[in-house]
Amino acid sequence: MLFNSLQFVLFLALTLVGYRLVERWRTPRHLLLLSASYLFYASWDPRYLVLILASTLLDYNVGRALARTEDQRARKALLWTSIVGNLSLLGVFKYGNFVLENLEAALGLPMPRVPAELPVGISFYTFQTLSYTIDRYRKTIDPARNLLEFALFVAFFPQLVAGPIVRASQLLPQLAAPPRLDPKAIGEGAFLVASGLFKKMVLGDALAHWVVNPMFAAPDAHNAWEMWTGLWAFFAQVYCDFSGYTDVALGAALMFGFRLPDNFKRPFLARSPLEFWRRWHITLQHWLEDYLYKPLGGSRAGPLRTDFNIVFTFLVGGVWHGANWTFVIMGLFHGVLSALWRRAGIPRNLTGYPALISGFITFNLMAFGTLFLRPMSVEDTWLALSCLLHPMREASGVWTPVGALLMVVVFGLHVTPYRWKTGLREWFGRAPAFVVALMLLVTGAICSVFAEFADPFVYFQF
């Protein structure tokens, strides 16, 4: 059940109506949302409900056990039970076939295969449940009150399959509190849903159709200028796709009275790689920083150890994206770049340079790194990179006026003042119901024109 489908729109509307009917009663409203969330997840493959239930039961019971003991040995054993259990499920189903294929190639011996496709969203909810256990071990949050609320925290459908990665401290208190009967939430949530679908279907999918997919269909057929600007287009497509999904997730959650954390803050305006990672996939970066980088010692253990901590954290972030050598390369690229950037003493926001220059340098570095986010073979990735060595090659014609226009629109919207979007969102929160309904109808009509270009959400593969 994709966000960019009529099926999801109907599902969201029916769930919202049902929720409004039972929102006064705590258990019924949680049961309704949990049932809807499991139905949403089962629409891909009902068998994978077993995995999300396993993670839920494991971490709920570990959290309860941590509340009953102060013995440090026992607490560490419980923590490692959660870590090993969750990462084992993630490792088998996400990385099992990758490891087996590489062993088969290295040893020349036939290897079995994991008889399953990648369970959608497993990377996101695994990190989400792990954050609860680690925070319980650190005693920074209270234990979940009951299994129903904890299961809903894990499986809440707006952010279940592609984030943002929500921590227990952010969502569990909202689940426990009485629902906020705020009529503004419907209008603001509808605006976010509409803007997210527009970004995804009209901008992201159209860029993929007109520029990105044709370019990567023949990765060695372009000259350097086409490939480089094609990387800009792919960067823009991924942003529109993923931030569009996030807007839909935040908007859908807001309609039920829940506020989820932002995941993007206009990353194309970053003036250094370090600033970029404070603006892009924010919840993943915060998770890696709090649960990996800082426990490794952060920047407190000397220059060499700090370099290692940075590179290793980015490597884990790269591998988190998927079982492919290109994701390993992506993690190493960003890790080494960040470590060198920090070691060279370059000002973190390049304040000594004009914003246009520092922003252009940063954008191109990040666009180059995005190439490794595309799930291609190493060979095809190398073919794409080799195009950058041929500036005089005859143009392949991958760029068309439509593609160029789409890029202008994407960047034009990206650089508009943030307060404009905030103000428009607040205006829709105060608007009459018929105005909100009209906006949704117009957005739906526009998106339907681009429906033939529809692609799956990029981050569903992670």
Image (cartoon, rainbow, N blue to C red):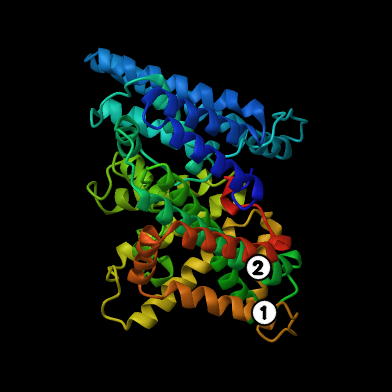
Along the viewing direction, whichever of 42 and 369 lies nearer the viewer? 42
Residue 206: mark in rendering: 2
Identify which residue is drawn at 45% across, 56% down: 433
Q: Which residue is mark 1?
A: 402
Q: Residue at x 75, y 64 (%)?
A: 217
Quadrant that contains the C terminus? top right
In the image, residue 227 sits, relative to residue 135, either above or below, namely: below
The residue located at (37%, 26%) in the rendering is: 25
Q: Secondary structure at mark 1?
A: helix
The answer to whether the residue labelled 2 contacts the one labelled 1, judged by CB atoms less than 8 Å apart, is yes
Dot label at residue 361: none
Asked which quadrant contains residue 291, the reply is: top left
State the SS at label 2.
helix
Figure quadrant of the N terminus: top right
> Looking at the picture, does residue 390 appear above or below residue 95?
below
Q: Nearer the viewer, residue 21 or 83?
A: 21
Indicate left or right for 342 with 412 as reference.
left
Q: Position of residue 310 (x, y in %)?
A: 36, 51
Give the mark nearer the N terminus: 2 vs 1.
Answer: 2
Q: Is residue 238 visible?
A: no
Q: Is residue 249 above or below residue 68?
A: below
3D distance between C-alphas at marks 2 and 1: 9 Å
Corner quadrant of residue 297: top left
Residue 202, percent from left and from top: 61, 66
Question: At x 47% / y 69%, what residue is drawn?
Answer: 365
Amino acid identity at mark 2: Ala
The image shows residue 176, relative to residue 213, as above or below, that is above
